[in-house]
Amino acid sequence: MVCALSASSTSIFFRKEPHSHHFRRKRFVSIRACTSAASPPDNINGSKVEYTPWLIAGLGNPGNKYSGTRHNVGFEMIDRISQEEGIIMNIIQSKCLIGIGSTGEVPILLAKPQTYMNFCGESVGALAAYYQVPLRHILLVYDEMSLPNGVLRLQPKAGHGYHNGVKSVMAHLDGRREFPSAILCWVFAGIGNPPGTMDVKAFLLQKFSSLERQQIDIALEQGVEAVRNLVLNGFDQSIERFNLGQKYKFHKV
């Protein structure tokens, strides 16, 4: 699931390096409020351009033991975005593996917290504060049992849904002076419910079946494009159409 957090009029100026997706942070508050959901650059021909960056954090557990499990769908989405956008994940900061790049002209920071799921808010909160990312530009990608396997959903408001990773993120962002009036927005990555009386924890740490794996791989491809559209255009009607298509993607007419 992906989550976007809202508000703060903080803007950040970045200097775009030639032939590189990387950007450098200059910390100061713009005299103009950024009001659009994904602000494009004001002057793409100048050497100094105003951007509103995005922090896209996938939630999961580090280590080969958890690779490919249901609870690590968030990590997989980040890996897929990094591949599609050519962003190298090679920086360790705030107990998190990160990659810095851009989608179109919009800077993005990809993050995979290495704190384990229940404490991932420590990393997300620290990165958001350090890079002065407004809450409306923070997206969380994580697994959601209330949706069928391979079904995605993007929405501008949601609660934590008893997801421990999301609880941790909300706890580390709630009440921060940098981020007043937060609104969390999510993209859910459905993994389905445990069969029968199977223990929830065992289900989350289980790998997908071959059919489920195919559904997840397709969902990841669709999710990359959806996230790209969200970053560039915000929550527009195309997101509504995307959600509708996802809702009925496995329904046969």
Image: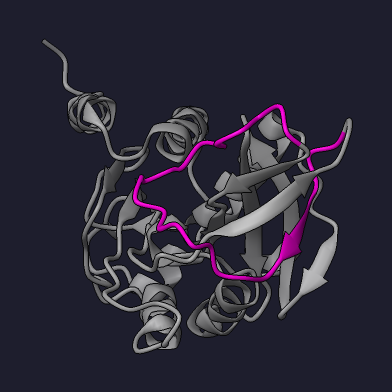
Give the position of the C terminus as an image quadrant: top left
Residue 58 in picture, x, y percent from top left: 54, 58
Vertical order, 87 against 185 (above or below): above
Q: Nearer the viewer, residue 83 or 240?
A: 240
Residue 100 seen in the current view:
yes
Q: With 201 as the anchor, is 147 left or right in this view?
A: left
**Residue at x 32% of width, y 78% of height:** 180
Residue 141 seen in the current view:
no
Vertical order, 144 against 39 (above or below): below
Residue 89 in picture, x, y percent from top left: 79, 53
Q: Nearer the viewer, residue 26 or 232?
A: 26
Residue 48 in picture, x, y percent from top left: 73, 44
**Residue at x 55% of width, y 60% of height:** 57
Residue 36 within the segment the image draws in magenta: yes
**Residue at x 57% of width, y 52% of height:** 53
Magenta segment: 20-46
